[in-house]
Amino acid sequence: MTDLTRRAAVTGLAVAATTSPALAAGAPRRVVSMNACLDTVLVRVADRSQIAALSHYARDPYGSTIADIARTLPFTYETAEEVVSLNPDLVISSAHSSLATRNALKRMGVRQERFSVPESVADSHKQIRDVAALVGHPERGEALIARIEAALRAARPRLGQPRLTAVIFEPNGLAAGGGTLVSEMMDRCGFENVAGRYGLKKWGNIALEPLVADPPQVLLAGESAPGAPTWAERVVSHPALKRVSGRMHRAVFPQRLLYCGGPVLIHTAAAMAKAREDAIRRFA
């Protein structure tokens, strides 16, 4: 384990196990999260006793960075019946959370706060501050942001290191173009995101053929789920990619690092920094 990944593992652990002596006046005592990315923030900034439930996605070790913590906490499948039965005084969600459940909660007068998907590190930091303030622990939000900023500084390329062209390539060829949070992370970690040269704008799929015909220096490739039988999963390890291995370095970039900001950025920065260093050593 490298120093970067070791730091990511340590700082990625929780505030969830801590409990403050007393909650601030008016702070919610039963919070339900209906979004996997908000789950990762909530477990870092709320008291464990405040967390009434996370989303079921948080328990998936393939898709979540907090699966170990999430398995010790209640969860829902986002149905209105489940959420209401928990008697929450705050539900946090995103535009991707169940619309039917959000509408039902609105009719029943349950307090909700809806968050958008952060498209920059600055957006992500604001989301952390907003969630931390909602649960009555703004100081934990600032502490988490400080850890993320430290991880970003540690992941910066050294002076004089070359920028490497790179593309994210997840199952089904899913990739991120410019104007996304993960593209900003690529830039901060010493990569030039060249998804645009394959016709991608923001989010979309890159076909295997143009990728093989004109490969980037680094392919930040997803991992196939264990036993996954579908073409969508198998494309990330297609034999055609091996034919350009002399010109393209392949690095592991799990899909769980693709969408979320917050504390996930600590893991993202470490994974990208390792990919950059490995590629530089290979091509040196």
Image (cartoon, rainbow, N blue to C red):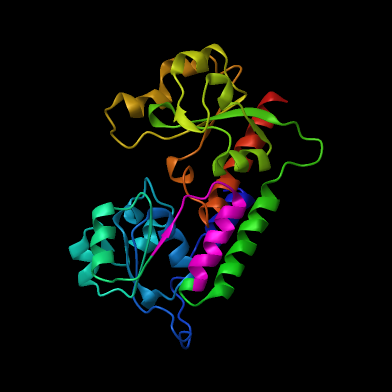
Task: Name the quadrant containing residue 125.
Answer: bottom right
User: Would you say 39 lies left or right of 217 here?
Assistant: left
Q: Position of residue 143 (x, y in %)?
A: 60, 69
Q: Residue furthest front?
A: 107
For residue 175, say whether it is visible: no
Q: Position of residue 25 (x, y in %)?
A: 46, 87
User: Would you say 73 lies left or right of 2 here?
Assistant: left
In this view, 96 is above or below 73: above
**Residue segment shown in magenta:** 113-133
Q: What residue appears at the point 22 percent right and 69 percent down from the top-left corner?
A: 84
For residue 158, say whether it is visible: yes
Magenta highlight on residue 117: yes
Q: Position of residue 202 (x, y in %)?
A: 51, 33
In this view, 128 is above or below 267: below
In this view, 182 is above or below 84: above
Secondary structure mostly taken by the magenta-highlighted segment of the chain: helix
Task: Name the quadrant containing residue 28.
Answer: bottom left
Q: What residue appears at the point 21 percent right and 58 percent down from the top-left corner?
A: 79
Q: How many marks?
A: 0
Q: What residue appears at the point 28 percent right and 67 percent down from the top-left corner?
A: 74
Task: Name the quadrant containing residue 16.
Answer: bottom left
User: Would you say 82 lies left or right of 93 here?
Assistant: left
Magenta highlight on residue 45: no
Q: Position of residue 42 (x, y in %)?
A: 44, 65
| Viewer-proximal residue among 109 and 17 | 109
Q: Residue furthest right?
A: 160
Quarter placement of the C terminus: top right
